[in-house]
Amino acid sequence: MNNKSRSFESDRQVSGNEILKAESDGLRSSIALELKDDSPTFSNDAAQILKFHGVYTQDDRDKRSTLRKNGSELAHMCMVRAAIPGGRLTPEQYLALDELASDLAGESLRITTRQGIQFHFVSKGDLKPVIKAVNDALLTTYAGCGDVVRNVTACTAPRSDGLDLQMAEIADQISARYKPASSAYFEIWSDGDRIEQAEADPIYGTTYLPRKFKIGIATTDDNCVDLMSHDLGVVLDPARVGQVGIVVGGGLGKGHADPGSLARLAEPLCTVRTEHLLQTIDIVLSIQRDYGDRSDRSRARLKYLIESHGIEWFRREAEARSNVPFMEFDSVKFSDSPSHLGLNLSAPSRPYYGLKLPSGRIKDTSQVALRTALRGVVHDFRPLISLTAKEDLVLFGLELEQLEKLRQRLDSDGVQLSESLSPLTRDSFACPALPTCGLALAESERILPTLTKEIDHELKLHALSDSEISLRMTGCPNGCARPYLAEIGIVGRSKRSYDVYLGANRKGTRLGTLYAADVAFDILRESLAGPLRLYSETRLSGEGFGDFCHRIGVQELTKRYAPAPRRTRKTEPSKSGQS
Ligand code: SF4
């Protein structure tokens, strides 16, 4: 890829992160040195570069205020993220990651909304063995975070037409091509030798991308990865073999106190022959690398470049850099966004079982030994595993009879099977938020079960218990669990209050609209009673809750039913997020 990175002189004042990247000696910074010192955490400069290695520095937020009050050191820890293209794991890889969680990472694994796995509560001293164990399982944490192409999402649940295999292959190709070229990762974590290389990365230059860059792949009949929320999306149409559509400029993160920030859906860019896909991604990345805002990180995602310059400008710029023919791509239509839960026989020779996980968390609790049960079935039945972008697990690669036995075993081990859960619980998930995420303003994962129970009660009152309604919750407006694409989106605003979004559709092609701001957790259920009652009484045949809210108008629903906002409360200062 032709590197046309602009110099700092030609930019407005660049942000501090740009200078850190440029001076990081190819993503090395002082990480290796600091790993040897006695401090329980890293310097801020090293912590910024650590993100490229898949590591966030954090502290236990549950303990923060007490420790501060006592004048003690914070409870420092790290989050380590394994990037797993398309979320596919062999049973051996799963068992290796599970063992790692036992030994060094807080006894839990956390599936992310981008089909990776996060380990929380890793001490600085355990970072090297944790990353080495991930590498030994033939996986990597490199580019799990940082201003580069992040983990590539794609639904890899089995399909009768085999497109899951094609998507998995494309995800692998994209993932391999856009890992940083620097050997820093192998030097630091595997004590490898330094390989002398050109100073500038051949794809990213010396300052990498202005911000993270998310790529996803979906088919027109299955948008479970929420493709339109990606910086770049690849659309496969089963009826158009040999071609792929490209969409660009999606991204959901925004700020409560930043009116110019926006959640945005991607727009169609072009259609290209499948063999030209990587060249086309090169071009899109090069435009973002060269023109993305490097002065203000809150405006540095591709979505802001396209929002300010327009998709026509972007297409012209892409065509000017391209030597492959672009064909038209008028509009993106998805027919479904399935959850992939329960026993699925749509590809009769490739059955699978989708297991609902509580917001992607795999751990043993006093109620159920979920991690132990999963370890047991993976060890004994040896299924292949696909992590979904809705934080669940798909188990496949077995004969139907074996799959049935696996399912029965989970049941007898006390694991709640997907089919025994309410539709709302099946279609809900949350981001981690407290106590690990430094950006969290409110609880999310830990409080979601209480919220779904409450809303399930409300649904029952309106004879809606069997209705399929999607619910997502996050601890801040960064939107890691994509709440603006759920029919009910709950976004943390302060310690005990949330904004409520309604009106998104189930296919992931329309964003929700703010219905009620700053609603106390205790009245979230009550705040939804009016819209749910109206939905129950006046919905059209087959109309989903999101479509209903959109048809009536979210503003109208706000006028009729939304509680008045509470007085805005002061929020706790943050350390480091994990978005
Ligand atoms: S950054 Fe915000 S949305 Fe993401 S995990 Fe943290 S609290 Fe949740």
Image (cartoon, rainbow, N blue to C red):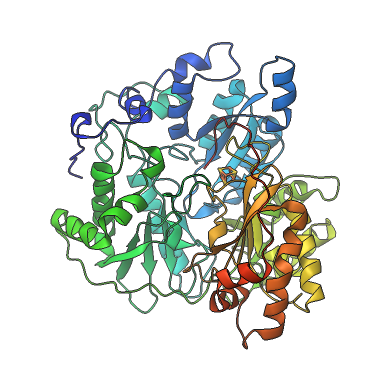
Ligand 1 visible in quadrant: top right
Relative to residue 384, is residue 150 depicted above or below?
above
Q: On the rendered structure, is 559 left or right of 151?
A: right
The quarter in which the N terminus is drawn is top left
Please identify the residue farthest to the top as the structure is shown.
38
Q: Estimate the x, y position of residue 134 in percent, counting from the top left.
A: 54, 36
Relative to residue 317, is residue 512 depicted above or below?
below
Relative to residue 205, is residue 514 depicted above or below?
below
Q: Estimate the x, y position of residue 398 in percent, counting from the top left.
A: 63, 64
| Residue depicted at x 59% and y 30% | 58
| Residue depicted at x 43% and y 34% | 52
Residue placed most toward the observer, 566 or 57: 566
Q: On the rendered structure, is 501 left or right of 323?
A: right
Q: On the rendered structure, is 568 left or right of 83?
A: right
Q: Estimate the x, y position of residue 357 in percent, counting from the top left.
A: 69, 55
Say which quarter of the image contains residue 468.
bottom right
| Residue depicted at x 52% and y 32% | 55
Residue placed most toward the observer, 51 or 353: 51
Q: Does the image show residue 406?
A: no
Q: Estimate the x, y position of residue 514 in percent, counting from the top left.
A: 56, 61
